[in-house]
Amino acid sequence: MKSPWDSIKVGYLRLIEPVADYLVRHRVNPNVITTIGTLCTIAAAVIYAFGHISIAGWVLGLTALFDVLDGTVARRTGRETKFGAFYDSSLDRVSDGMILGGLTVFYATNTPRHSVAMVIICLLAIIGTFLTSYTRARADALGIDARVGMLQRPERVVLLSAPQAFFGLAFHGLVLAAIVILLAVTSWITAVQRIAFVHAATTPRADRREKSVDLSSQSTASPDGARAAVHAPSPRP
């Protein structure tokens, strides 16, 4: 049974299919699509920084299709390359940093919404987001697919765009603050989950089994020793 998120992704892919067909027919370079998408994301980050939260949410949401189009066009035109994957991943980090950086500037400079606590949370979200990406990249370098965790990048993009587009600074900005806090917490949880996954994948099962056997033998040895000491005859004077 498909999850609601999978159904949303299928519907989104069908929605942008005509755009993908057009780009494939005109043989548009996938790296150009990636670059344009990043520039649009930077524009959304600047709009966030100036406090136009709803507009930024719409810009980010509408331009997020570039994240899907570059890979789709690359596959359908036979232009999938190692550099293309590297370039796309690198600019994704730029996009993530710029969006959360824009929100950091917003909370640091916007007088009505100024909050030192939210600035710190935004910074933690930036670090957590980069750590989430790095742990997966480092695992890939080790030959381990660490695509696990609570929150993947597509979900992060949706959380950074859709609620802001519809709510903006409604409810005294509580919706925006809740989203940023949620992103900060889930990014760190995801990073820890990936670290644990790689640890489990790189620790030999024999070692884990030996450790468990050692622990069990120690736990059973102590009671036996105690019983032996109790029942042992005391030395005669």
Image: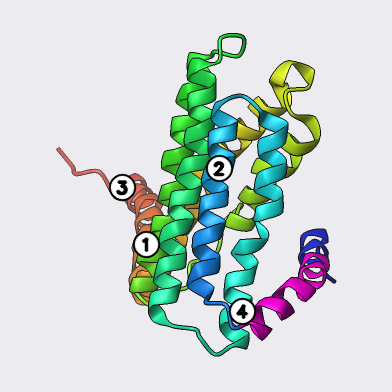
- Is the Cβ of the residue at disc 2 closer than 8 Å to that at disc 1? no
Residue range highlighted in magenta = 10-26
- Is the Cβ of the residue at disc 2 closer than 8 Å to that at disc 3? no
Main secondary structure of the magenta stretch:
helix
Image location (x, y in percent) of residue 15: 82, 67
- Identified by mark 2, the residue type is Ala
Q: Quadrant of residue 211?
A: bottom left
Marker disc for residue 73: 4
* 158 or 202, nearer to the observer: 158
**16 sits to left or right of 197:** right
* Mark 4 crowd level (few <14, some 14–19, many ≥20, 10 Å Cα): many
Q: CA distance from mark 1 to mark 3?
A: 18 Å
Image location (x, y in percent) of residue 10: 79, 70
Comparing marks 2 and 3, which lies closer to the viewer? 2
**Is 216 in the magenta?**
no
Residue 95 sits above or below residue 18 on the image: above
Marker disc for residue 217: 1
Comparing marks 2 and 1, which lies closer to the viewer? 2
Which residue is the site of mark 2?
43
Q: Residue at point 25% right, 43% down?
A: 234
